Each structure stands twice: as C-alpha cells, then as structure tokens.
Image (cartoon, helix red, strand yellow):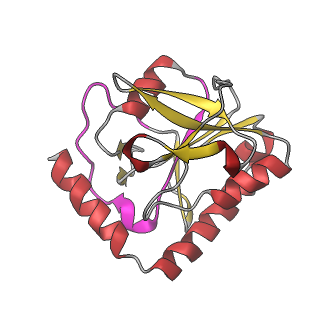
Amino acid sequence: MKKKLRKEALAKRKEIPAEERAEKSRRITEHILQSEVYQKAKSVFSFVSMGSEVEMRDILRQAWKDGKNVAVPKTKQGREMIFLKIESFADLKEGRFGVMEPVTQEEIIPEAGDLFLVPGALFDRNKNRIGYGGGYYDTYFEKYQGYRKIGLAFSEQISETDIPTEVNDIPLDDIVTENGWEE
C-alpha cells in the first residue's frame, strides 16, 4: 500500500509545473524563515533538494547569513545517516542515490530547540509521512530526539485520509506547505 501511495504522490508532485513549484517553494521558505522556531534555532538540519522537492537553497543561504549551523544528511550502510555541517554549497558532491551529500567531516547532533526540515512523498493531517522507502529518517528520529521535526511539502502532497503507518514510523511535529503551517 505504501509503495503505491508513494508512487502516486511522487508522480503528482512531478506534474506540478516548474514555475508553480518555484513559487510554492518561495512561500514555504517565507513561512519557515518567519517562524519563531527558525528564529530561535541554533542549528538547521535540512535536506538538499533534488528533483521536484521543495527547493531548499534560500533557506540554507539565509541560515548561513543568520549565523546558524547548517547540517545535511550523508547516508551510510544499514539505513543509517549522519548530519554533517556545511558552510556553503561547495561542501557538497553527488553521493549515493544521486543525492548531493556533504564532503565535510563535522557531525552535528540535533539538540532541543533545533530545527529539523524533512522531505517526503506524502503527508497526512496526523503528521505522518511516507518517505522514499529507505527508513533513514525514522531510524534517525528513533536515535536522536527532542528537536522540532517539520515536514516540507506542497499542498498536493497532503492526504485528506490517514496514510498507513507501521510501528517504526515516527510522526513529525509540524508540516508546512505554501499555505502555511498545517493544522
């Protein structure tokens, strides 16, 4: 069931015209940067956008300007990932799965008050998500806790019905779309 939902959601996201995705990404960026959780965060944990995902570059640029630590994931064997500090886009190169990954070595562990931005294929009103099938984020969330996990999505990625969950699925704290913070 999850595989089918993931495939449908990714196809739907890909169908959003590039200009519309760019505008929606801009609005999502505004909602994040104007939020109290962003303002107070010492570190921003983020993904590096690929394909039709929410564009993250403006959030990362602003975080650097604001003197925040920026950390992005590097995947390892066994559904494990770590977050390494980057200080510019020059600190990235193509890694596993064709995703841009850090070439830096300084691992950062999220702390209370940090902002953790999460990608996904499909989200529901209960803050559950269907990711890309690797289980990396749920494994990470199980290991480290106490920070704000916020899913970033276009409104087309919000399911009006509950998505199926499994025991190891960890819900997010919030979801932000171009329309704002989802209730």
Q: Is residue 47 visible?
A: no
Residue 136, x across and y down, in percent: 39, 32
Task: Examine the structure image and report whether residue 148 is included in the region drawn in magenta.
Answer: yes
Q: Is residue 113 left or right of residue 94?
A: right
- Residue 96 occupies which quadrant of the picture? top left
- Residue 102 is situated, as x and y percent measured from the top left of the image, at 59, 38
- Residue 70: x and y in percent read 70, 40
Q: Residue at x 46, y 41 (%)?
A: 95
Look at the image and say whether residue 25 sits in the magenta stretch. Answer: no
Seen at 22% across and 57% down, the residue is 7
Main SS category, magenta section: loop
Total numbered badges shown on the rendered structure: 0
Q: Is residue 84 above or below residue 47?
A: above
Q: Is residue 17 left or right of residue 73?
A: left
Q: Nearer the viewer, residue 90 or 123?
A: 90
Instruction: Please say if 33 is above or below 170.
Output: below
Q: Is residue 129 left or right of residue 166?
A: right
Q: Is residue 100 left or right of residue 14?
A: right
Residue drawn at x 18%, y 48% as measured from the top left? 3
**x and y, in percent, of residue 121 in the image:** 35, 54
Point 37% across, 42% down: residue: 128
- Where 27 falls versus 159 (above or below)? below
Q: Quadrant of residue 23?
A: bottom right
User: Which residues make up the magenta segment?
Assistant: 146-171
Q: Is residue 161 visible?
A: yes
